[in-house]
Image: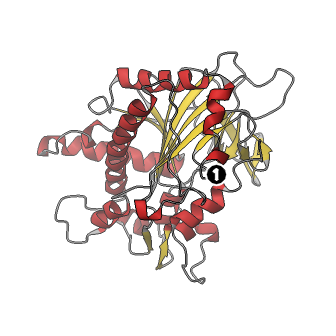
């Protein structure tokens, strides 16, 4: 079947307003739409969150990011990741690496703070976040933004669970929704501010190389720049080839009042491969400096992923049976290489360290 040329738009409003008998039909419709998008594409636009995030807040978070990136290089250099724990902080253009190739963007990376007894700035990911002094409102705006992304992330988890046929009503006897909620009770979030200058005119480069995200969901807020973010849709008649599969790269241009949302590998595991984590990349050639704020909604850093205990009706309907066993999130991989034979000895931080340690090129 040819790949769709556009991504669906799904309203999350029924899951962000009080639950009543009158909203049940709308909740079911949203849940079904999320399920379809996660099964078919792995990407969609998310709307209907005005009760949680205002248009003014969406503008403001991009403004403070743009102001930060416009700061003098020596000011941003005070926040270099090597001056922190090696992950939290600023990366200059070309320092971020995807598939062993330098990306043409700069970024400021923030992670959920660890409990005080686990902080150690000498260990990757164990240090405090590095916040810029300018603009002065940067930290206040971003911390408020992160709080609101938690609300949207949990609502989206509920819609996803309902789409899989899980009983999300309070007091449900099977307890599957309660287990899922417990997995994100203190999510180890990642929030990035990313700045993209235009690729050099004579370069065949990539602003951000093709990759998949590994958590639950990514909520991407970007400025209005078109023809930058691209999504790979599998299509046997497509002209592009990625990882041995044919497909088509389509633009996922911003739509006002929405986030671009994509499924991470965590849901691919929990759904036994029914949901797909999809390749995406950024190629930004327009002259305007592009700014985006991706928020990665992850499991708790010490979450145990109970593979096989999550057996919603949607999997049985598709004839899918997850491999049974309990694994820490740190050891989880997509179903194709998910091996339960080795002993689960590490938690999410070790997994993240293995990912982050390869993300950056050495830089002064």
Q: Residue at x 32, y 67 (%)?
A: 179
Q: Which residue is drawn at 52% across and 65% down?
A: 348
Toward the right, the furthest residue is 202
The quarter of the displayed image where residue 20 is located? top left
Q: In this view, does 264 lie above or below 321?
A: above
Asked whether 69 or 214 is in front, the reply is 69
- For the N terminus, the quadrant is top right
Q: Residue at x 31, y 55 (%)?
A: 162
For the residue carrying disc 1, how many other residues have a C-alpha within 10 Å: few (<14), some (14-19), or many (20+)?
many
Q: What residue did someone put label 1 on?
A: 86
Q: Is residue 117 above or below residue 53?
A: below
Residue 340 seen in this snapshot? yes
Asked whether 155 or 122 is in front, the reply is 122
Answer with left or right where residue 207 lies relative to residue 139.
right
Residue 274 seen in this snapshot? no
Q: Which residue is drawn at 44% across and 57% down?
A: 114
Answer with left or right where residue 252 lies relative to residue 196.
left
Question: Circle 1 — which element?
Answer: loop
Asked whether 359 or 2 is in front, the reply is 359
Answer with left or right where residue 250 lies relative to residue 239.
left
Q: How many numbered discs, if any?
A: 1
Q: Where is residue 106 in the image (x, y as percent from the top left)?
A: 66, 33
Asked whether 20 or 188 is in front, the reply is 188
Q: Where is residue 26 in the image (x, y as percent from the top left)?
A: 25, 40
């Amino acid at each position: 079947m040819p790949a769709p040329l556009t991504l669906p738009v799904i309203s999350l409003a029924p899951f962000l307003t009080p639950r009543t008998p009158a909203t049940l039909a709308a909740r079911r419709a949203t849940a079904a739409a999320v399920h379809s998008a996660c099964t078919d594409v792995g990407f969609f636009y998310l709307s209907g969150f005005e009760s949680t995030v205002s248009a003014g807040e969406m503008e403001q978070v991009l403004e403070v990011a743009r102001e930060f990136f416009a700061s003098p290089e020596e000011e941003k250099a005070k926040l270099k990741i090597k001056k922190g724990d090696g992950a939290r902080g600023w990366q200059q253009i070309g320092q971020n690496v995807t598939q062993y190739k330098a990306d043409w963007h700069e970024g400021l990376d923030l992670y959920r703070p660890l409990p005080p007894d686990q902080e150690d700035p000498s260990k990757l990911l164990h240090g405090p976040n590095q916040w810029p002094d300018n603009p002065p409102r940067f930290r206040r705006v971003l911390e408020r933004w992160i709080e609101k992304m938690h609300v949207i992330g949990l609502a989206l988890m509920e819609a996803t669970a309902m789409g899989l046929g899980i009983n999300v009503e309070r007091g449900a006897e099977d307890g599957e929704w309660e287990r899922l909620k417990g997995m994100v009770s203190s999510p180890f979030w990642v929030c990035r501010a990313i700045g993209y200058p235009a690729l050099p005119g004579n370069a065949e480069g990539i602003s951000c190389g093709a990759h998949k995200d590994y958590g639950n969901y990514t909520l991407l807020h970007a400025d209005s720049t078109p023809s930058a973010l691209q999504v790979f849709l599998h299509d046997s008649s497509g002209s592009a080839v990625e990882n041995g599969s044919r497909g088509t790269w389509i633009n996922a241009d911003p739509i006002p009042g929405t986030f671009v949302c994509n499924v991470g590998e965590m849901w691919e595991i929990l759904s036994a491969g029914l949901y797909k984590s999809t390749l995406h990349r950024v190629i930004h050639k327009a002259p305007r400096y592009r700014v985006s704020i991706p928020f990665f909604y992850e499991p708790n850093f010490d979450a145990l992923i109970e593979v096989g205990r999550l057996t919603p009706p949607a999997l049985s309907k598709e004839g899918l049976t997850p491999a049974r066993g309990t694994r820490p999130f740190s050891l989880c991989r997509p179903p194709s290489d998910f091996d339960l034979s080795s002993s689960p000895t590490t938690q999410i931080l070790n997994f993240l360290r293995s990912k982050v340690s390869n993300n950056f090129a050495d830089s002064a």
